[in-house]
Image (tube, rainbow, N blue to C red):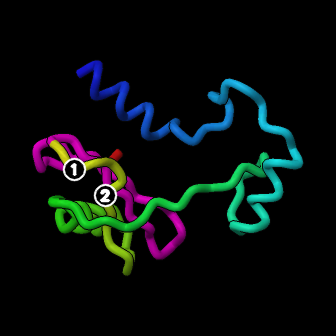
Amino acid sequence: MKRLLALTALVLLGGCAMFRSSPMPAAAATAPARAAGLADANGVPIERVPYRVGVSSNTVEQLARQHACLGAGGAGLVTTEGPVEIYRMQCADGKVFMARCELRQCRKM
């Protein structure tokens, strides 16, 4: 269980700028951000996760509809396939719906 919590924390905080070992110079951070077009408040580029269908994608889409999240893109798998998976779905109103599925039993995060 501790390993699972650590994995979830790493997935959610993996791109956080405060966990870097050395600070990134401001000039180096803004140049790639302009090229990519997406950057956070500090100018660090935002990485896009490719859409991947998972075993529980349909279940997560149904769960999202129950929580008033309607989206045309569908629920994409964020983590690797396995007994515990995390899904992400973009809602029509701009919000993000995330769910955690353990052995195909899904819950809203």
Which residue is identified by label 1?
81
From this view, report whether residue 34 is shown above or below residue 83. below
From this view, report whether residue 19 is shown above or below residue 102. above
Q: Is residue 107 visible?
A: no
Give the residues in magenta.
83-107
Q: Quadrant of the N terminus?
A: top left
> Which x, y percent locates residue 39?
71, 57
Q: Residues within 10 Å of mark 2 (few under 14, many from 20)?
A: many
88 within the magenta span:
yes
Residue placed most toward the observer, 93 or 102: 102
12 left or right, relative to 81? right
From this view, report whether residue 50 is shown above or below residue 82. below
The number of numbered badges drawn on the structure is 2
Q: Is residue 17 visible?
A: yes
> Which x, y percent locates residue 13?
52, 36
Residue at 27% x, 46% y: name it: 100
| Label of residue 23 in the image | none
